[in-house]
Image: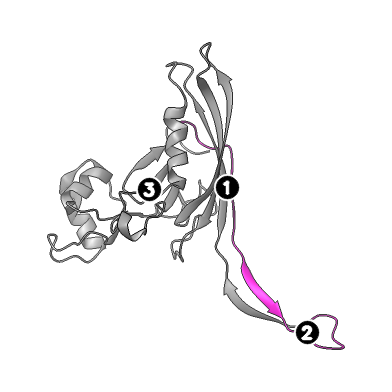
């Protein structure tokens, strides 16, 4: 079993991190490819020709409970719902050009890393309420659709012994490598590990919008 305390979380393109209150009971994902068969008179089974790969999909259920604090569970569920809406935090966003979009996300749990995805649907089911009508428990079903081709395909088993995967980070305006290192490691001096992993010679030349691999470091 996975070590106690290993919490799942959702990495968001904007640099935000949504931690899961409870780990999901199960994960399921689907990958597929498209094949087309040419009609050939007199032949029962046509030969298939590959046309293209299809976007992968993934589904998971998360559980949130705020009965201990008494606060509305919407504090957590609204963060998930926001992933389906246009984000003004994304690099290059311009309201006048109507070029907004929701952010992509990556789901992490231990050594498991999903493909880069967009949240295609969210279903929230409130199952317990306070005396004042505030929802205190919720089940949230999330459907993810692969955003782009990702060579770092998800591990098949969260408890497998494969090396710990890397995370991704899109550089935002005003960010520097030391600030990014602090965000991911809690240690600004680890900026050298990020620079080395991304073959960056000049740490001051990283431009906003650049996608960085965030390597796993010891300690």
- The residue closer to the viewer here, 95 or 197, is 95
How packed mark 1 is, by other alpha carbons closer than 10 Å (few <14, some 14-19, many 20 or more), is: some
* Residue behind mark 2: 39
Residue 92: quarter of image: bottom left
SS class of the residue under badge 2? Answer: loop
Q: Are marks 2 and 1 in contact (CB under 8 Å)?
A: no
- Residue at x-position 56% and y-position 43%: 60
Q: CA distance from mark 1 to mark 3?
A: 17 Å
- Outermost residue on the right side: it is 42
Q: Which quarter of the rendering shows the C terminus? A: top left
Left or right: 27, with 102 as reference point: right
Q: How far apart are the two marked residues, 3 and 2, measured between alpha carbons?
A: 45 Å
- Colour pattern: one colour
Question: Label 3 neighbourhood size at 10 Å, few (<14), some (14-19), many (20+)?
Answer: many
| Figure check: 211 above or below 185 | below
Q: Can you say whether 162 is above or below 185 in the image?
A: below
The residue wearing badge 1 is 59
Furthest-bottom residue in view?
41
Label 3 sits on residue:
12
Hey, which residue is sitting farthest front in the picture? 96
Residue 21 coordinates in the image, percent (x, y): 45, 31
Does the stretch in magenta take in 25?
A: yes
- Please give the range of residues in magenta: 21-45
- Where residue 12 appears, as percent x and y from the top left, is 38, 48
């Amino acid at each position: 079993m996975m070590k106690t305390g290993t919490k799942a979380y959702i990495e968001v393109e904007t640099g935000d991190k949504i931690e899961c209150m409870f780990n999901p009971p199960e994960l399921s994902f689907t990958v597929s490819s498209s094949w087309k068969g040419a009609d050939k008179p007199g032949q029962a089974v046509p030969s298939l020709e590959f046309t293209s790969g299809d976007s992968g999909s993934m589904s998971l259920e998360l559980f949130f409970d705020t009965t201990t604090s008494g606060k509305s569970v919407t504090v957590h569920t609204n963060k998930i719902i926001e992933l389906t809406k246009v984000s003004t935090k994304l690099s290059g966003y311009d309201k006048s050009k109507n070029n907004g979009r929701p952010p992509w996300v990556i789901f992490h749990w231990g050594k498991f890393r999903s493909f880069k995805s967009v949240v295609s649907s969210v279903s929230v089911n409130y199952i317990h309420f306070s005396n004042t009508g505030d929802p205190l428990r919720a089940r949230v079903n999330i459907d993810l659709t692969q955003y782009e081709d990702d060579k770092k395909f998800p591990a098949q088993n969260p408890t497998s012994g494969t090396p710990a995967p890397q995370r991704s980070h899109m550089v935002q305006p005003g960010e520097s490598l030391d600030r990014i290192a602090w965000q991911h490691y809690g240690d600004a001096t680890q900026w050298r590990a990020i620079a080395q992993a991304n073959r960056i010679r000049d740490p001051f030349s990283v431009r906003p919008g650049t996608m960085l691999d965030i390597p796993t470091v010891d300690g």
